[in-house]
Amino acid sequence: MEPYRHTVQYYETDKMGIVHHSNYIRWMEEARIDFLRRIGWSFERLEAEGLVSPVTAVECRYRASAVFPDEVAISVRVGELKGAVMRFDYVMTVGDRTVCEGRTEHCFLDGNGRIVRMNRAYPGFYERLRSEMETE
């Protein structure tokens, strides 16, 4: 799948002209939302089905600085998928330079806040995510 692309905005930089570290986590969310939309399971669809997937863990490894107005390519892949837990892996690059690598972990909850085992409750979504793991 083609990477999600984000152009660094001036307001995302600090006094030194370097992207503030918190923005990389925001970009992971942008890329994840785009990824889900592209595989046919947009946030709107998930919420309409009564499913939410809150973040339970975030990890960022900063490798190099991004600056205004770099275009950051963000590759997203499903790194792990269990019945109730999913992990996304991200690689952010500017040209041929890796600027950040990250991960987010999510659980699945229904509208009442109860844990949902995806393979049982939403097998279509589960299999679509699994197929993305197999094509990477």
Image: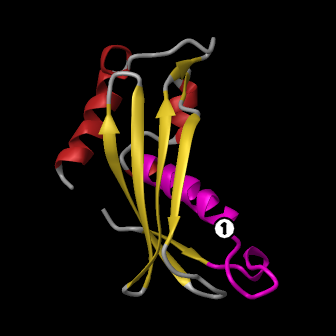
* Residue at image coords 36%, 86%: 96
Looking at this view, is 51 or 26 the one in front? 26
Question: How many labels were placed on the picture?
Answer: 1
> Circle 1 sits in a helix, a strand or a loop, which is it?
loop
Q: Position of residue 37 (x, y in %)?
A: 45, 48
- Residue 17 vertical position relative to residue 90 in the rendered view, above or below: below
**Rendered image quadrant of residue 91:** bottom left
Q: Residue lying farthest right? A: 15
Specify the quadrant that holds the N terminus: bottom left
Specify the quadrant that holds the C terminus: bottom left
Residue 84 in magenta? no
Q: Main secondary structure of the magenta part?
A: helix
**Rendered image quadrant of residue 66:** bottom right
Residue tagged 1 = 21
Label 1 Cα neighbours within 10 Å, binned few <14 / some 14-19 / many ≥20 = some
Q: Position of residue 41 (x, y in %)?
A: 43, 39
Q: Position of residue 73 (x, y in %)?
A: 45, 74
Q: Residue lying farthest left? A: 134
Looking at this view, is 63 or 5 the one in front? 63
Q: Position of residue 44 (x, y in %)?
A: 57, 37
Tell me the magenta residue range. 8-36
* Residue at image coords 38%, 15%: 121
* Residue at image coords 48%, 39%: 105
- Residue 126 vertical position relative to residue 9 in the rendered view, above or below: above
Residue 21 in magenta? yes
**Rendered image quadrant of residue 114:** top right
* Residue at image coords 63%, 86%: 67
Amino acid found under the numbered disc labelled 1: His
Figure colour scheme: secondary structure
